[in-house]
């Protein structure tokens, strides 16, 4: 058998061809040849062992993939609407798959690798950007809903277990993505969790040294040089020749020495106090900022009892003959500005039609640039949207007519029905629906004036999160399938209503589908006449 023509390791080849001698001319040389054969046998056995270990690892990957896939197919919507499951699915098809491709690097597996490459080119496949987005979404949920890292890693969302646990590698990847984004706070949280889980796992694809390297540098970036040095020394105990760790160790020691040698200057305490005062001043300047918004999302802020006592539910007919038979059921959610909830105004059949027509048109949702008026993608709006015209289906036309009956406003200048599905941790940070005075190019191409009112249909229930919140007035509207929210964006004078600033909270568990009709000023002159009375200056935008 000519071993040179088979896939034998290079070491075996060396054993055979590196020594050129006429072994057949002396029995003594044949004795030495037995030793050479033993080397070949040992090398082959080591190769077989390595291949068996690789196959065993591939089997574990395949079993794990199959296990997760089986769980997903039991209830696809329930599985993918969980942000932890969504993140791990994207990870399995990005970083995990890259590891598999590296393992399957032999000639035998070339056909299988070609299949995977073909899938990536012809089918929907996640990218590294998707993985980063999924990781950022999880950390956003973690912050907004104050989720404990360990509980989240166990698959628990606010005490309810929805999914299987994250592995050490899953936590490591969350930490790595946070690190790549310059988010050292979440890097520390997830790398620490990865290290904890690494101790309890028999089989893993990451090392403690990798975790320690990220932990040390992120700790330094967070300002704790002492702990960064300790973690670096711990890393060097594992790998004494680690180049980056050796360089960082010298740097951290120099930084600590500088701190020791530099005496504290008079006034340092005062500067710290000034900085704290600036932070307080910033909070006072924006009392309805991020923390307030997140508190509303968690349901921690409620309307005052005096206002709740004034809210009413009633039937509305608008003197419409049809509505005399089937009036709208309207619930007041807030007074000044008036927020209304219309119940049972979109049927399940209509919802399915809207979803079906929207899916092929979905694109990343955009926002309008306040300077240019152009639409652009923004990190603070995570969702996909589509626009549907009334002539596309009877149900779309029916919805438009229903909005006219609900609001008493003309649909002649209203925008098309916008359909939105929020992604992993999907949200839309606080914003106005109307264009402010400095946004002179907004809606210019439409020629229909500003957005006078908004109707927002909820087309799905959401297990956790996903509320529409109004930070300035402290109101929160929770998604309920088939209902619609309605409010005026403009005062009767045409001035923007500052109190209508609102946001879509991140979806913690579930899939959030909404659609909305934005109604414009033109055509409403006799339906909602202008008034000369204007709100106070501080309430005008």
Image (cartoon, grey):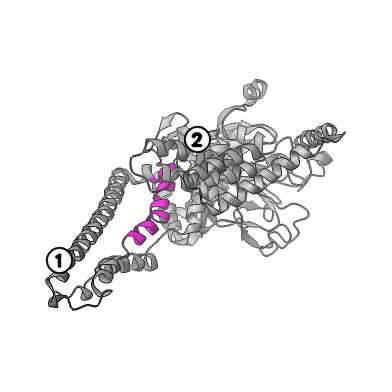
| Residue 36 in picture, x, y percent from top left | 21, 65
Task: Give the total number of marks visible in the rendering.
Answer: 2
The residue beneath circle 1 is: 31
Quick check: 114 above or below 456? below
| Residue 62 in picture, x, y percent from top left | 28, 52
Q: Nearer the viewer, residue 422 or 28?
A: 28
Q: Secondary structure at mark 1?
A: helix
Tag shown at residue 248:
none
Provide the residue span drawn in magenta.
80-103
Quick check: 425 above or below 104? above
The residue beneath circle 2 is: 149
Task: Identify the mark nearer the N-term, 2 or 1.
Answer: 1
Q: Is residue 499 magenta?
A: no
Q: Is residue 55 visible?
A: yes
Magenta segment, prevailing SS (helix, strand or loop):
helix
Q: Secondary structure at mark 2?
A: helix
- Distance (Cα) linking label 2 and label 1: 64 Å
| Residue 133 in picture, x, y percent from top left | 52, 52
Q: Is residue 87 magenta?
A: yes
């Amino acid at each position: 058998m000519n071993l040179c023509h088979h896939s034998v390791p290079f070491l075996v080849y060396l054993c055979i061809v590196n020594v050129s001698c006429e072994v057949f001319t002396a029995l003594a040389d044949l004795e030495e040849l037995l030793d050479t054969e033993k080397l070949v046998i040992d090398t082959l056995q080591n190769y077989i062992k390595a291949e068996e270990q690789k196959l065993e690892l591939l089997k574990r990957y395949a079993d794990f993939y199959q296990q997760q896939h089986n769980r997903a197919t039991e209830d696809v919507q329930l599985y993918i609407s969980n942000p932890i499951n969504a993140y791990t699915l994207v990870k399995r098809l990005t970083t995990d798959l890259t590891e598999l491709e590296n393992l399957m690097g032999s000639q035998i597996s070339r056909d299988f690798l070609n299949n995977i490459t073909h899938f990536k080119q012809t089918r929907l496949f996640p990218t590294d950007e998707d993985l980063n987005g999924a990781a950022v979404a999880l950390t956003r949920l973690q912050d907004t809903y104050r989720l404990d890292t360990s509980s989240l890693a166990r698959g628990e969302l606010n005490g309810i277990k929805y999914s299987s646990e994250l592995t050490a590698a899953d936590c490591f990847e969350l930490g790595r993505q946070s690190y790549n984004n310059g988010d050292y706070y979440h890097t520390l949280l997830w790398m620490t969790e990865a290290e904890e889980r690494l101790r309890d796992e028999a089989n893993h694809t990451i090392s403690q040294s990798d975790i320690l390297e990220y932990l040390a540098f992120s700790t330094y970036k967070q300002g704790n040089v002492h702990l960064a040095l300790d973690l670096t020394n711990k890393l060097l105990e594992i790998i004494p020749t680690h180049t980056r760790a050796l360089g960082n160790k010298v740097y951290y020691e120099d930084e600590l020495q500088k701190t020791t040698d530099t005496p504290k200057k008079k006034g340092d305490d005062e500067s710290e106090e000034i900085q704290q005062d600036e932070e307080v001043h910033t909070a006072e300047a924006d009392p309805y900022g991020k923390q307030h918004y997140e508190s509303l999302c968690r349901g921690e802020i409620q309307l005052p009892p005096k206002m709740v006592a004034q809210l009413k539910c009633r039937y509305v007919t608008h003197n419409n003959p049809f509505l005399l038979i089937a009036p709208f059921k309207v619930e007041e959610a807030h007074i000044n500005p008036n927020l209304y909830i219309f119940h049972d105004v979109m049927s399940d059949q209509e919802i399915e039609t809207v979803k079906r027509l929207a899916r092929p048109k979905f694109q990343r949702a955009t926002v309008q640039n306040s300077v240019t008026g152009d639409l652009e993608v923004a990190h603070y709006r995570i969702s996909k949207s589509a626009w549907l015209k009334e002539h596309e289906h009877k149900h779309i036309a029916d919805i438009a007519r229903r909005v006219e009956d609900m609001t008493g406003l003309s649909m002649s200048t209203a925008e098309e029905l916008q359909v939105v599905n929020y992604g992993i941790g999907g949200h839309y940070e606080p914003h106005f629906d109307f264009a402010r005075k400095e946004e002179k190019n907004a809606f210019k191409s439409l020629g229909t004036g500003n957005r006078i009112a908004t109707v927002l249909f909820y087309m799905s229930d959401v297990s956790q999160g996903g509320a529409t919140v109004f930070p300035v007035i402290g109101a929160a509207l929770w998604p309920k399938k088939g209902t619609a929210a309605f409010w005026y964006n403009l005062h009767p004078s045409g001035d923007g209503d500052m109190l209508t600033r609102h946001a879509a909270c991140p979806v913690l568990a579930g899939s959030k589908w909404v659609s909305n009709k934005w109604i414009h000023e033109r055509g409403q002159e006799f339906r909602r006449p202008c008034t000369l009375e204007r709100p106070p200056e501080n309430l005008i935008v």
